[in-house]
Every structure is written in C-alpha cells, then in structure tokens.
Image (cartoon, rainbow, N blue to C red):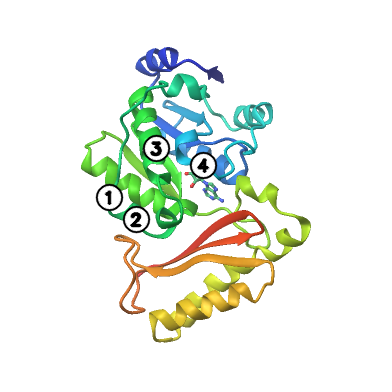
Amino acid sequence: MRVVRRLKEIRQLSRTLARPISLVPTMGALHDGHLALVGRARNTVGRQGSVVATIFVNPTQFGPHEDFGRYPRPIRQDLARLRERDCDIVFAPKAEDMYSADSSVSIQENKLSLVLCGASRPGHFSGVCTVVAKLFNLVSPDFAVFGQKDFQQLAILRRMVRDLNFPVQLISHPIVREADGLALSSRNVYLSAVQRSEAPVVQRVLRAAATKITKGFRGVARLENWMHRSIEASPLAKVDYVSVVDPDTLERKASLRPPILLAAAVFFGSTRLIDNYLLEK
Ligand code: AMP
C-alpha cells in the first residue's frame, strides 16, 4: 500500500494505475463501516483493478461552530487498518495543498441540499460536492463508493455526477451498525457512556416507524410527531429533525406510500448523530 500526500503525485500515479479504479473518500477515524466500503471497492474492481482510499478532514464542509478542530485524526491506526484491507493507495493530502488561500470556486447543489442536514448545516453540501469533485479530478476513478448512512450526501453526489457529467459510477453501500443497532460513526467516540447507551433509540424508533407504515399507519405529520416524541422519550436525546421524505427527491412525502426514507438527526449533548431507514416500494 502506498501513501501519497502530494496532489501532483496522486495525479501522475492515477494515470498509471491498473484500471478500473475505485475511489473511497473518507475523513479518516476509520471504523468497520469505512472498511466495508473499501471491501466493496475491491469487489467492484477485482484483483486486477486498483482501490484508492482518501483520508481528508475537509475544512469546507464544517460550519464555523462545528467540530473541525477536534475531529479525530488517528492517522497511523487508519493506515494500519487500510493496509489489512487490501487497499492499494491512500491519498491523504494537507488542507493547505487542497485549497489555495484565495480559492474562489465551489460547487453548489441547489435543490436536494436545502432540506434535512442541508437546512441545519448551511454550506455543508457545497463543501462535500467541491471536495469530491476535486478528488474525482485528481484520481479519475471509474467507480466511487459511498455509504447509505449519509443518504442525502449520496443523493446530492448522484445529481452532481449526472448534472456535471463526471465519468464515474457511484456505488452505495448499506449502513454498517453496532450489535445494538447504532450506526457506526467516527463521531460516536464523542459520546459519554450514558449517551452511548441511549443512542440506539434513534434506529429503534426509525425501525418501529417503518413497521407502523407497513401495518397501515396513516398521516405523515402524525408519524413524524410520533417519531419525535419517541426519540425524545430518551431524556438525553434532542431531535434536530426527523422527516418522512421521498428517497429520490428528498421532498416531504404527501402520504405514507413507499418508497419512503425515514431520516433523523439527533443531538446527544453536543454530538449530532444521523441515521435513516429506507422503505422500498
Ligand atoms: P466520513 O469519513 O464520515 O466522511 O465517511 C466516509 C464514507 O463512509 C461516506 O461515504 C459515509 O457514508 C461512509 N460511512 C460512514 N459511516 C458508515 C456506516 N456506518 N455504514 C456505511 N457507510 C458509512
């Protein structure tokens, strides 16, 4: 496994890498969810192809009062994990190399990014689109693998690829969870022991809501209210949003007829966790 830090080097290297190339963008602090994406990338390209993972805590996707400064950066441990997982190249650039001090161009998605996490985190998805577009330009991958945990991110990146004609195929991977149902996240390390034990309530309520839908429950607002109350039945949980939306447009559903995405963002103290449940047609 080769670790590359310079933009010029990754650009040159990607021209000579065996194709197809599969890219796995991450911010590091790798857990089994990230590693599952790396495994998926390998399955997609086979033994002949190349897997490139990136580790970059992207400053432009963090708001001014968010956790950019304290986001975990266990780079040695991350590299050891990737080495075990049959990754060919790790690209881990420095922020000052990725962004010029007077950088003035970014990518803005204007529809799907206005709702859900986009409403709570202005500028977040512009930062995500911009950094992913830059990684696509630097690595020229044939495939890029993203997790369904960040469902909205995936939907927005699909639009970006479609609307800006990036020659890359996006692959989505299901959410990897702890044994008690909590979605793996690099931010779970921020949780205190009691917050950690309460956090699976989000996934339990999303699943219970899906069961209600399949049993004929009526009323989108009624269901959202029920989910909100059920999550906040845990005294440590504070709902940011819990929404019943269309998985393609991310618009609020008019009825509880699948396909439906149940999406939630919930604070435990200052830690904001997201999760979702997809009910297909
Ligand atoms: P991050 O490092 O949080 O930016 O995540 C990098 C990639 O890993 C994104 O495509 C995420 O959707 C994906 N990811 C993070 N957590 C999980 C999880 N629990 N299951 C599946 N994919 C995940």
Element type at marker 4? loop
Cβ at disc 3 under 8 Å from ligand 1: no
Which mark, by number, is residue 110? 1
Q: Residue at x 52, y 30 (%)?
A: 56
* Mark pair 3, 4: CA separation: 29 Å
Residue highlighted by disc 3: 144
Element type at marker 1? loop
Image quadrant assignment for residue 267: bottom right
Residue highlighted by disc 2: 114
Which mark, by number, is residue 64? 4
Element type at marker 2? helix
Q: Quadrant of the C terminus?
A: bottom left
Marked residue nearer the N-terminal end (4 or 2): 4
Marked residue nearer the N-terminal end (3 or 1): 1
* Mark pair 4, 2: CA separation: 18 Å
**Amino acid marked by disc 1:** Asn
